[in-house]
Image: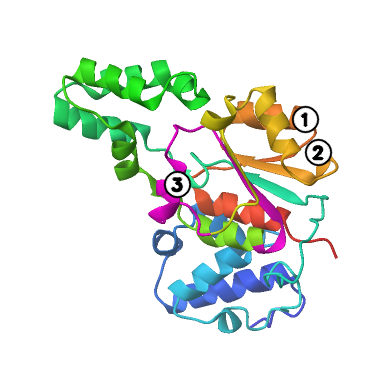
Amino acid sequence: MDSGGSLSEEKRLGRVLQVARKKEGLTQQALCQKTGLSYSTLAKIERGAIAAPSVFTIQRIAATLGMSMDELLGGVEQNRPSFVAPVANSRKVSRSGVRFVYFDMNGVLVRAAVSKACMKLAEESGVTPDIIETIFWQYNSDVCRGSMSLDEFNTILAERLEMLVDWNRYYLMAVEPTPGINELVTWVAENYEVGLVTNTFPGLIRPMFERGILPNITFDVLIDSSEVHALKPDARMFEVAADRTNIASPSEILLIDDDRSNLAAAGQFGWHTMGFDAYQPEDSIVAVSTALQPAD
């Protein structure tokens, strides 16, 4: 059997992973289901097509196969930063010059829960979900911007649904953290300055921290749209976010967001941007963790 000595590190890792997976009697699809990886990501790793697999992905695969990192990476050189999380002894600079990372909340740190909250309200009120969701989106921007109070919004909902409504309570019951995001954000916070910049209803962020829905870290900067009275992609939102950092150049800021219009607006301010898909998070986590490998 070919020892793999002439293969690249990525292809040797792919071969080791493939052998370990088959030894456990798992198909690629079965391993994907157990790890939460997308099929395309796992297939690329096994082919050696991902140049710098994230430590987060490798750790998850190893745990699923009942192996240690050392066992899974046996025969693969481990002195590369792509396989070892950097030691958090100082704030770092990424290879692309990033020093500060802003995370969006809904659609990145958590999976947006508007539809689920509307479904629950529909069950209790007898009003169809589409009507409730139409009401929500009619007033969402005003509430998130702080030009309409949460009480005013709840009153409108109550009148239409003929029942007392606390929107935030329903949202908190429905929202859930994005799988794998806690370890990613924790690692980023150990190595870079981090912030949260979000379009959100007032009064949601604190209970989401208290309930463990948001990552248990201290953000260096927290921008709540309802407090600054601006929404992404408004220019003011990015002006406030930039001003609250200690970063000299906009090219040192990265925004991770799921909304293309927000990413485009941040790019116009000279920020780095990365899209995120909370429903296929492993692909996004691989991309983010790879992009944020510190410069040598």
Residue 157 position within the rendered picture, expressed as x and y whole percent measured from the top left = 27, 20
Crowd rating for badge 1 (residues with CA inside 10 Å; few <14, some 14–19, many 20+): some
Asked if residue 130 can be seen in this view, the reply is no
- Residue 256 vertical placement versus 86 (above, below): above
Residue drawn at x 53%, y 82% is 68
Q: Does the CB distance between marks 1 and 2 fall below 8 Å?
A: yes
Residue 226 is situated, as x and y percent measured from the top left of the image, at 51, 29
Q: Residues within 10 Å of mark 3 (few under 14, many from 20)?
A: few
Q: The C terminus is located in which quarter?
A: bottom right
Q: Is residue 14 left or right of residue 60?
A: right
Q: 281 and 152: which one is in front?
A: 152
Which residue is labeled 1 in the image? 269
Highlighted range, magenta: 190-216
Query: Was residue 288 drawn as part of the magenta stretch in this picture?
Result: no
State the image coordinates of residue 247 (x, y, percent, origin top left): 80, 45
Q: How far is the residue under mark 2 from the one under mark 3?
A: 28 Å
Residue sitting nearer the eye, 283 or 104: 104
**Relative to 183, residue 21 above or below:** below
Which numbered disc flags the more N-terminal residue, 1 or 2? 2
In the rendering, which numbered label is found on residue 23? Answer: none
Residue occupied by mark 2? 250
* Residue sitting nearer the eye, 166 or 275: 166
The picture quadrant where one finds residue 192 is bottom right
Q: Which residue is mark 3?
A: 206
